[in-house]
Amino acid sequence: MNVKEVLADLASHADEARKKHNVKAGAPENQFGVKLADVRALAKKIKTDHALGLALWETGNVEAQLVATLILKPASLSAKEVDAMTRSTTCPQVADWMNAYVVAAHPEKDALRVKWMKDKDRWAARAGWNLTASCINKGGDDLDHEALLDRIEKEMPKAKPEVQWTMNNTLGAIGIVNASLRKRAIAIGETIGLYRDWPVSKGCIPPFVPVWVDAMVKRAKK
């Protein structure tokens, strides 16, 4: 398939109501309002196509970029290219798929993580904190959890919303895996109060750290 054919396929699954909802939530206008399941189905049909993935990313279309994250070859991208793509992200959904399917599989992700953790760009910083939370969840023991809590306590209240989300994920990860710092992590979450009133469906765990950490720790003990 080529770019024109991919865009045509995506357009055939367009949902104007979904698009309006997405735009109202802060996503860019350059999208069709396609269900994520349909995006995945199209990417599965295309399989790996690095050149097409790069071309789709350049369109700036949300769904085209989502497809791109699923068909690119992460190892074929230079660290500079990954950095540029991350900074050109336009919405959280694309950022999260870029982080999960491209950045996380890149051989230089650790160096990028360190660089992005110091960055003022909202998408780079979001990616840096996302990778940090992932390292903690996977049991990485080379990170200074106390220093991370110091930064979160100081920076999260004033961070941009896109960055707050993955900083909060890091805070929650520390609280869940590090019993010695759990009390402090929960206290920071309580004091900052981020996502305290986050709406969730019955049976789901909210991202408010005190509730989230408590629920996950209890679940692990069962």
Image (spheres, rainbow, N blue to C red):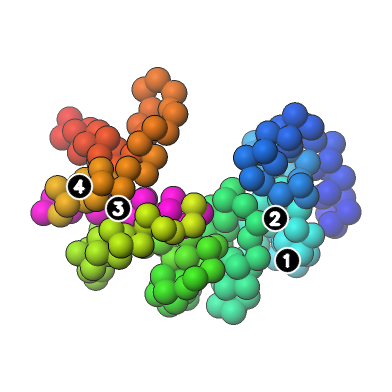
Q: Could you tell which of marks 2 and 1 lies nearer the N-terminus?
A: 1
Q: Which disc is residue 54 wearing?
A: 1
Taken as a whole, is the magenta stretch helix, strand or loop? helix
Other residues around mark 3 within 10 Å, as few (<14) / some (14–19) / many (≥20): many
Contact between marks 4 and 1 (CB within 8 A): the answer is no
Q: Could you tell which of marks 4 and 1 lies nearer the N-terminus?
A: 1
C-alpha distance separating marks 1 and 3: 34 Å
- The range drawn in magenta is 162-180
Q: Quadrant of residue 32?
A: top right
Residue furthest to the left in view is 180
Residue that mark 2 sits on = 65
Q: Could you tell which of marks 1 and 3 lies nearer the N-terminus?
A: 1
Q: For the point 67% across and 38% down, which residue is it? A: 24
The x and y percentages for residue 201 are 44, 23
Q: Is residue 189 magenta?
A: no
Q: Quadrant of the N terminus?
A: bottom right
* Residue type at numbered disc 2: Gln
C-alpha distance separating marks 3 and 4: 11 Å
Q: Could you tell which of marks 4 and 2 lies nearer the N-terminus?
A: 2
Q: Secondary structure at mark 2?
A: helix
Residue that mark 3 sits on = 171
* Residue type at numbered disc 4: Ala
Q: Is residue 179 magenta?
A: yes
Q: Would residue 140 be seen by someone viewing this image from the given angle?
A: no
* Residue type at numbered disc 3: Leu
8 on left or right of 154: right
Q: Secondary structure at mark 4?
A: helix
Q: For the point 14% across and 48% down, which residue is it? A: 183
Q: Nearer the viewer, mark 4 or mark 1?
A: 4
Q: Nearer the viewer, mark 2 or mark 1?
A: 2
